[in-house]
Amino acid sequence: MKTFLHSEERREILSRIRKLTPTSRRRWGAMTPHQMVCHLADSVRAALGTRQIHFIGNALTRTRIFRIMALNSLPWPRGVLPTAPEVDQAAGGTKPGEFEADVRELVRLLDEFANAEARSNWPDHPIMGGFAREDWGRHIYKHCDHHLKQFGV
């Protein structure tokens, strides 16, 4: 399974982020490229524990089988998983400012995550519950990959 914790896969995601423009065409969904950058940044803040996101999962999403399916190498289906209001830019998420500055902030947060020291108290995922650093690494890779594909990068 791909993970943001592997340097080659991290370089791939960062390269794709840098190809994104404010005018990149959306293939599905309602977010703009700029909203997506802020959405990903808020999600990384959640992984780092600097943005609180309330649990929106259920008994099914907390199961081991769901986690394996969500973090495997298959693409995520579009529009299936709910978005927590704290990372939804149309609700309570961080509002876009200046595009290039927001991209730099996303890259900074991703670097902070990649360089975070091992610890035992990683925040819970808002849908799947308890996560370790390795789970967050796989999730961040898949989440970035999903939304970058949404904009053709």
Image: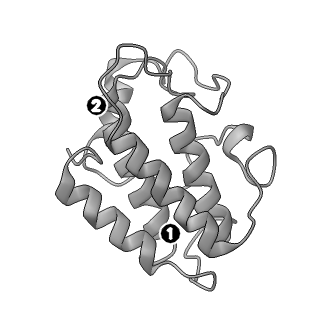
Q: How is the image coloured?
A: one colour
Kindly identify the amino acid type of the residue bearing the numbered disc 2: Glu
Residue to which mark 1 is pinned: 150
**Residue at 40 percent of width and 18 percent of height:** 63
Q: Quadrant of residue 99?
A: bottom right
Relative vertical location of residue 33 with respect to residue 117 in this rendering, above or below:
below
Which residue position is annotated with label 2?
A: 134
Residue found 64% across the figure and 57% down from its top: 38
Q: Answer whether residue 33 is visible to the viewer in this image.
A: no
Question: Element at badge 2?
Answer: helix
Q: Position of residue 42 (x, y in %)?
A: 61, 45
Image quarter of residue 121: top left
Left or right of 40 in this view: 136: left
Q: Is residue 40 left or right of residue 1?
A: right
Q: Position of residue 62 (x, y in %)?
A: 46, 18
Q: CA distance from mark 1 to mark 2?
A: 24 Å
Under mark 1, the amino acid is Gln
N-terminal label among 1 and 2: 2
> In the rendered view, does 147 fall on the left or right side of 26?
left
Any mark on residue 49, and which? none
Residue 113 seen in this snapshot: yes
What element does badge 1 sit on?
helix
Task: Tell me what residue is drawn at x 55 percent, y 28 percent.
Answer: 49
Residue 94 vertical position relative to residue 17 in the rendered view, above or below: above
**Is label 1 or label 2 in front?**
2
Position of residue 35 measured from the top left corner of the image (x, y, whole percent): 68, 63
Q: Nearer the viewer, residue 8 or 24?
A: 8
